[in-house]
Image (cartoon, rainbow, N blue to C red):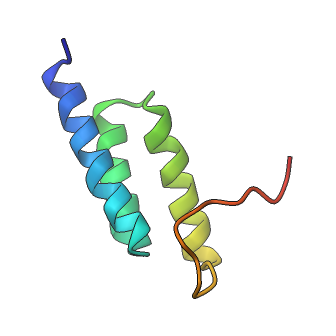
Amino acid sequence: MISETKREVLSLFDEGRLLYKSRAFAEAMSKFAEALKLDQEDGPSKVYYARCKMYLENPPPPEWDGVFIMTTK
C-alpha cells in the first residue's frame, strides 16, 4: 500500500515530467522541489530537479525530444 505522502510525491513528479517534456523547465523544477519537500530522498525528483537546473542554464537544442544524453561518465 502506498502512503498518502508518496501518492502526492508521485503526482507532483508526474506533473513535473509533463512540464519537463514540454520544455517548461522552471515550472517543472518547482514541481520537483515540492515533491522533495515531502520526501527529501525521492531519487527521481532529485535527478529531474538537477536536469531542469542544467537546462535552464544551458537550454537543449530546438530538436530536443526529451531524452537526456549523458556527456560525461
Q: Nearer the viewer, residue 38 or 73?
A: 73
Q: Please, which residue is most extreme toward the bottom here?
A: 62
Percent coordinates x, y for residue 22 in the rendering: 38, 74
- When asked about the image quadrant of residue 18, the answer is bottom left
Q: Is residue 38 left or right of residue 62?
A: left
x and y percentages locating residue 71 in the rendered image: 81, 60
Q: Is residue 42 left or right of residue 30?
A: right
Residue drawn at point x = 41 percent, y = 65 percent: 20
Residue 57, image x, y percentages: 61, 75
Of residues 70 and 57, the one nearer the viewer is: 70
Q: Residue at x 29, y 49 (%)?
A: 14
Q: Residue at x 36, y 49 (%)?
A: 33
Q: Taking 14 as reference, is 1 above or below it? A: above
- Compared to residue 63, the image places residue 21 above or below, namely above
User: Percent x, y for residue 46?
Assistant: 50, 42
Please, is residue 60 above or below residue 3 in the view? below
Q: Locate residue 20 relative to residue 47 in the image: left or right.
A: left
Q: How many marks?
A: 0
Residue sitting at x 36%, y 62% = 28
Q: Quadrant of the N terminus?
A: top left
In the displayed structure image, the side of residue 11 where residue 4 appears, left or right:
left
